[in-house]
Image (tube, rainbow, N blue to C red):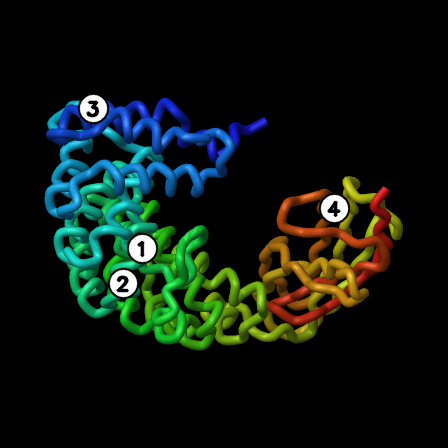
Amino acid sequence: MAEPLKNLLHPGVVIAIADALERNAAGFDRKRFVALAGDGLEALELMQRSLQIRDALVETLPQAFPEAAANLHACLPRDGADGISGWSLLPFSQYVALRGLDDFDLSLSLLRALTPHFTAEFGIRVFIDRDQERALATIRDWTKDPNHHVRRLASEGTRPRLPWAMRLLQLIRDPQPILPILTALLDDPEEYVRRSVANSLNDIAKDHSDLVAAFVAEQIGDASPERRQLLRHASRTLLKQGHADALGNFGFAPPAGINARFSLDRSDIVLGESLGLRLAVSHDAETSQKVMIDYAVHHRKANGATSPKVFKWTSATLVPGGSIEIEKRHAIRPITTRRYYPGAHRIVILVNGQEAAEAGFDLALE
């Protein structure tokens, strides 16, 4: 079993931070910090642990933010020497977000220094929310930074709907201000950065589908394989939704002359088992057609209605008179993000975003 995420911040981390601050902060009350940060720590979840350590920093670092910022900066790895890094820096970033709003430029500079050792994407967001124009002016310069972690912070920190973080409501309403940042990073040499750009565009697509489809259309002409992969990943939500313009960006036209036969290997299943899916698709139009084949499982809800979840399957090019036959298994197993209900479910085949065939099954929980 995987180690729980909360254990990334453990009592040993508290001691390591205390040791680093004792070396670098004159008058630092090590004993008080350890007592405050470690009090009942192991009973808390990850973010609760981080916030408790942050609050201990608030109580024991100098009240003057520039002095406290210098103490934190001195704890970072430098000149080949060890320092605080990894998840241990999450409380540092949260401290800056809490205490540094009145020292805007110094705080952004410190977050930039933190991020090569652990992402500051959580800490940067309160500054964007407080003064978006001022923050983005600095962040745009980070797209040219020689350190790829800083360049990634420019895209990841500005994601409108970053998981685990506060939502940037202004950018959810109007994402135009971050498009120049994302454009500047489209051809970044690091896949780590490009994937962040794709995720940000996918965030935007959830609220502004036509905007992202148009952005992709502008950027896909003569695109390198790396950029094309980025744009495809950025369009994943739109492609699952069958957005016509997004499909068209990748050569998937509305299906014509497509015939689909779909079946399941059983009509009854118990939670934890899997279904066998079998699909035959033929093409009787006069020209070849590129097809993207997905399927949507319509899960039953408590009120008897169903809610679809789209899964990727395959892509192919069908010649006139051609056909393909494909099979796969789909597990119906417990997951933390879904509650299952017994009764009728259905699976719908999607060809270029349009329903082409379906089959049903009954689910029992035991």
261 vs 120: above or below: below
Spatial CA distance of label 3 from label 1 is 26 Å
Instruction: From the top left corner, tell me how far across and down residue 13 is, in percent.
Output: 34, 27
Q: Secondary structure at mark 4?
A: loop
Q: Residues within 10 Å of mark 1 (few under 14, many from 20)?
A: many
Q: Residue at x 47, y 63 (%)?
A: 235
Q: Amino acid at mark 2?
A: Ile
Relative to residue 203, is residue 54 drawn left or right? left
Q: Nearer the viewer, residue 124 or 274?
A: 124
Three-letter code, disc 3: Asp
Q: Quadrant of residue 142?
A: bottom left
Q: Which of the labelled discs sits on residue 332, or is there none?
A: 4
Horizontal placement of 83 versus 40: left or right? Answer: left
Q: Amino acid at mark 1?
A: Gly
The image's mark for residue 82 is 3
Measured as percent of width and height from the top left, residue 332 is found at 74, 46
Please report whichever mark, 3 or 1, sits nearer to the chain's N-terminal start.
3
Disc 3, disc 2: CB below 8 Å? no
Q: Which residue is mark 2?
A: 128
- According to the image, label 1 marks what residue? 157
The answer to which of 240 and 154 lies nearer the viewer is 154
